[in-house]
Image (cartoon, coloured by chain):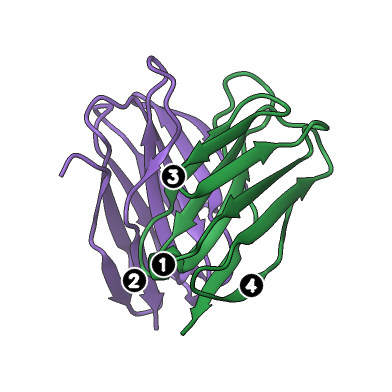
């Protein structure tokens, strides 16, 4: 499978714990995005990388959230001191600026904070 | 928050019927995208539109980029059970280099047996 891969698919955590999600983009894609989707809503943009540089962050990304893409390949999204309001589907997408593709999404990580 | 108005919010149809949904915005954009999302999965790109008036088909799906550049519609002909899911429109801001997508709230399609 050469699509966008996310791990884990599901995560249940207690409030106050830290969680980390991983995204592996399509191998030749240099752009990587994180979105969050709550029930009944469309995905909302969180942040975007071109290679290893984080170029834009949404105001939705509070201080408890941090994303990295250290080598310009896979990315991690960490949420510290999780709150119940963080429960959502976290989606990763990737695209290429050199061949001008639209974003392809992974299957997402469903986070439930109890 | 969301700036795209998508309608209808939900549709209940019988297999074989045609479906039409649309998306409107108060602002002009250069790109309209249509995605489909199955339960527990990520969105899958169906059709991308880049020019006002553009009409593009993908199998039984047809989408158009409105002349005013503020709206788009998606039609599905002769619906089948695997068409069930949530359909999202999305747009990219016009400023060059900004890749952030804004999604509509979705149209949930249900096929009644």
Figure quadrant of residue A31: top left
| Residue A114 in picture, x, y percent from top left | 39, 84
Tag 2 subunit: A
Q: Are marks 1 and 2 in contact (CB under 8 Å)?
A: yes
Q: Position of residue B38 (x, y in %)?
A: 40, 65
Query: For the point 57% across and 69% down, which residue is it?
Result: B108
Number of numbered tags placed on the structure image: 4
Mark 1 and mark 3 residues within 8 Å of each other at the beta carbon = no
- Pinpoint the chain carrying mark 4: B
Front residue of A81/A36: it is A36
Q: Which residue carries the number 4 mark? A: B10
Q: Residues within 10 Å of mark 2 (few under 14, many from 20)?
A: few
Marks 1 and 2 share the same chain: yes
Q: Judge whether A52 appears above or below A85 on screen.
A: above
Identify the residue under disc 2: A17
Q: Residues within 10 Å of mark 4 (few under 14, many from 20)?
A: some
The quadrant where residue A99 appears:
top left
Residue B59, which numbered label? 3
Q: Quadrant of the N terminus of chain A?
A: top left
**Do marks 1 and 4 share a chain?**
no
Residue tagged 1: A81
Report whether mark 4 lies on the same chain as mark 3: yes
Q: Give the chain coloured green.
A: B
Q: Position of residue A9 (x, y in %)?
A: 26, 64
For marks 4 and 3, give the CA distance: 22 Å
Which is closer to the viewer, label 4 or label 3? 3
* Pointers 1 and 4 in contact (C-beta within 8 Å): no
**Marks 1 and 2, the one that precedes in the sequence:** 2
- Mark 1–mark 4 Cα distance, whole angstroms, equals 36 Å
Q: Chain A appears what colour? A: purple
Determine the secondary structure under disc 1: loop
């Amino acid at each position: 499978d050469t699509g966008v891969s996310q791990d884990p698919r599901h995560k249940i955590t207690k409030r106050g714990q830290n969680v980390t999600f991983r995204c592996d983009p399509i191998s030749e894609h240099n752009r990587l995005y994180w979105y969050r989707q709550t029930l009944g809503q469309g995905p909302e943009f969180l942040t975007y990388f071109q290679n290893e540089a984080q170029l834009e962050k949404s105001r939705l990304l509070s201080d408890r959230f941090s994303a990295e893409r250290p080598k310009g390949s896979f990315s991690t999204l960490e949420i510290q001191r999780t709150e119940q309001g963080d429960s959502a589907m976290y989606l990763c997408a990737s695209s290429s600026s050199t061949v001008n593709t639209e974003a392809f999404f992974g299957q997402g990580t469903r986070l439930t904070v109890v | 928050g969301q700036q795209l108005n998508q309608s209808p919010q939900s549709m209940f149809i019988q297999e074989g019927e045609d479906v039409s949904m649309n998306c409107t915005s108060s602002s002009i954009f250069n790109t309209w995208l249509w995605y489909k999302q199955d339960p527990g999965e990520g969105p899958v790109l169906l059709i991308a539109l880049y020019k006002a008036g553009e009409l593009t088909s993908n199998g039984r799906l047809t989408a158009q980029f409105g002349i005013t550049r503020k709206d788009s519609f998606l039609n599905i002909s002769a619906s089948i059970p695997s068409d069930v899911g949530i359909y999202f429109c999305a747009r990219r801001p016009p400023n060059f280099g900004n890749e952030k997508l804004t999604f509509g709230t979705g149209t949930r399609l249900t096929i009644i047996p």
